Amino acid sequence: MGLRLRLLLLAALLVPGRGQGVGIPPPPAASLRLVAVGDILMHQDVKRAAAEAPGGFSDLWADLLPLFRGADVVFGNLETPVAPVSGRPGKPFQFNAPADLPPALRASGFTVLSTANNHAFDQGRKGVRETLARLRQAQLMAVGSGEDRSRAEALQIVERNGLKVAFLGFTDVFNLNLDRGAAEPWVRPFDLEAALAAVREARAKADIVVVSIHWGQEDQHQPTKRQRDIARKLVEAGCDLLLGHHPHVLQPLEWMTVNGRPALVAYSLGNFISNQDRRYRADRCPVAEGDDRDGAALEVTFERHRNPDGTTSVVLAHADYEPLWTENNWGAGPGVPRRIHVVRVAAAEARAKDLLGHLEDPQRADRPVGRQGKHDLAAMREHLRTLILRRRRIASILGQGFEAGGEVSLAAAAPVPPGAGAAPR
């Protein structure tokens, strides 16, 4: 068979409806998976726990490493300067983090961090500069602050899998606002009209628009009417995903749809890691007194879809969350290493059930016996009970935000039993 004939036959096979071939299937649709968590707080005991952990900071959230490393983009709110050279040692309500935090975050899978929050100026303008330099050195994208105003307000775009994600960062809350001249370090304050203009610009330049806002009232589980109005306007302007933080507790997730385009608002993702509510014990405290240790890892998937008219569009196709809980051994006694770490509640609950079932099996020769054995079993049962209570508590707050619909997975969602705890704070 001549070369020309072979080429003609090959061409026939590659064209749908020609010859005996079925044609080349269309390429798989582009998709992007984003994971977002809340406040990364550097209380003194959190830093001490990292210093005493064999693997440093990464050990404090080791349970989440597979989740982070399996995502295309991982976002968190960095609620601390990283200014060991230009700043002062951290103290209550005025944070500073050591130099090994940014590399640990990057090695864990984080890619984008909000630096617009009420602690951004804790170490002054020099602290802002040093923080940004250290994040850049660790290959972490900072959104919402800059060495000057233009860089703080510049549109930040991440490209993954052929999709462009635009990030915008704002803070509605300042402890100390040191924004001065446009040539000085700047933390971007929230202004509605400016934010709407920035979202429209991002919509024209990217496939996906993510807005981060530090806002809301601390320890409140519901956003204000003002926040809900702002969220609606940002979605109407083109925001696909709004990530809120600052209250230190969880707030509802809410679907919004504008002209057939779904968007998701997370009013507050709670704390990712902190030393708050360190005295909480499920056997002694109302469930609400542990709310500052609850968190959520929000998982969203964007997909490029082909429209009936032949055009394509990128949509938020799926959203889900994993409940998180910060375990804290505060009060364990002298000589005990300080241990603060975040766990994925569902996985931790499954592990606890397996271990307890193993230890309670009457057929096993190694079943704990004696006073110490009974104490250990009681402690394990209480640990499992705590995880169950926290899972239900988290679902009671976040789950209601999905009532508007959308493709979500809420297998873990279950109402808090009557009398299980106090009303939301």
Image (cartoon, rainbow, N blue to C red):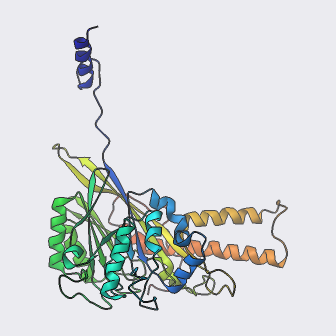
Most distant residue in the top direction: 1
Residue 21 in the image, given as x and y percentages of width and height: 29, 21
Residue 382 image-quadrant placement:
bottom right
Residue 367 in the image, given as x and y percentages of width and height: 81, 66
Q: How many marks?
A: 0
Q: Is residue 282 above or below residue 210?
A: below
Q: Is residue 205 above or below residue 96?
A: above
Residue 419 visible? The answer is no
Q: Identify which residue, 211 or 97, lies in the foreground.
A: 97
Q: Identify which residue, 419 or 391, lies in the foreground.
A: 391
| Image position of 152 (left or right of 369) | left
| Image position of 18 (left or right of 115) | left
Q: Identify which residue, 204 or 216, lies in the foreground.
A: 204
Residue 119 visible? The answer is yes
Residue 208 in the image, given as x and y percentages of width and height: 25, 60
Q: Quadrant of the N terminus?
A: top left
Residue 244 in the image, given as x and y percentages of width and height: 33, 75
Q: Quadrant of the C terminus?
A: bottom left
Q: Residue at x 43, y 82 (%)?
A: 84
Most distant residue in the front direction: 85
| Image position of 307 (left or right of 281) | left
Q: Identify which residue, 285 or 196, lies in the foreground.
A: 196
